[in-house]
Image (cartoon, rainbow, N blue to C red):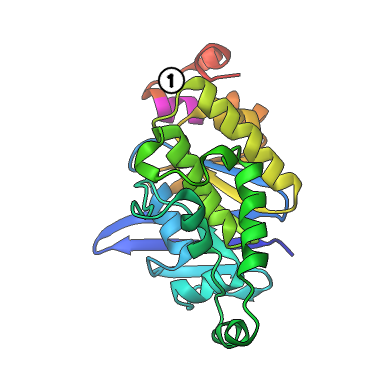
Amino acid sequence: MSLLATHSLRINYGGLVAVNQVDVRVEAGQLVGLIGPNGAGKTTFIDALTGFVRPSAGEIHFAGRRIDGDPAHRRAQLGLARTWQSLELFSDLTVRENLLVASEPRRWWTFLADAVRPDVRGRGDAVDTVLADLGLAAFAERMPDDLSQGQRKLVGVARALAARPQLLCLDEPAAGLDTSESGDLGRRLRRIVDAGVGILLVDHDMSLVLAVCDYVYVLEFGRLIAEGPPERIRSDERVITAYLGERAGNRAETVMPS
């Protein structure tokens, strides 16, 4: 059974169909990409997965149970985490404190347990591990506003990981990063999935997605037009046409990043 699976997922906004009959799977320890032109429905899809948009039809299954009727906080408790395109960091907290907030216990009885036997030290150790894994240990006591855009993006990923999710949905984590920062992000994402966490990566950086993902889904106008390993997506004429707006034929190798 897949860690995450959607079945015929549809999301309507009035008369507009934003996501239409989409089936996506993510396994534990797998890095899956979701790409498509602007307006394809990628962020709406993540919103539906994480409980911020109600599907009009279809099903979402996570960790062995159906969750499309669950509220966002319940899905987070089950281990489904996300990042946002706009960085939602606490500007008055240090980087480490931002992660500590995210690592707070997520069930009511753990608050009672912590009142009797606080586990702040244990959570602090876990936060320090995440900071080290993402190359942010040197910035732990810095304020978010003192960091570069690339560093703040990594803090957003680290904060989501601090909640110890089973699946992490990343919404445009490479936006605003230069080529070097994007490559470094890709290498760190591979380490995360190698540790057993599933990742669904939405990004416009085609070089990043095709370089690091195990499997890729392509959306256009809310519908899946292609899926498969990166080498298949790279040469798929439907994908090239969706991005270029014209038939590309044998030019696939020159227009899609390798």
**Residue 23 belongs to magenta span:** no
Q: Is residue 155 left or right of residue 192?
A: left
**Percent from the top left, x then y, of residue 231?**
66, 27
First to last magenta residue range: 239-243
Which residue is identified by label 1?
A: 247
Packing grade of label 1 (10 A; few <14, some 14-19, many >=20) is some
Image quarter hosting the C terminus? top right
Residue kind at label 1, given as amino acid type: Arg
Image quarter hosting the N terminus? bottom right
**Percent from the top left, x then y, of residue 206?**
51, 28
Residue 52 placement: quadrant = bottom left
Element type where label 1 sits in the image = loop
**Percent from the top left, x then y, of residue 51?**
44, 68
Nearer to us in this view, 224 or 190: 190
Q: In the picture shown, does residue 38 fall above or below 223?
A: above
Residue 80 placement: quadrant = bottom right
Q: Is residue 96 left or right of residue 54?
A: right
> Which residue shows up at 38% across the image and 52% down it?
89
Nearer to us in this view, 173 or 130: 130
> Which residue shows up at 68% across the image and 54% down it?
197
Dominant secondary structure (helix, strand or loop) of the stretch shown in magenta: helix
**Percent from the top left, x then y, of residue 69?**
47, 78
Nearer to us in this view, 248 or 40: 40
Q: In the picture shown, does residue 112 fall above or below 81?
A: below
Q: Is residue 23 visible?
A: no
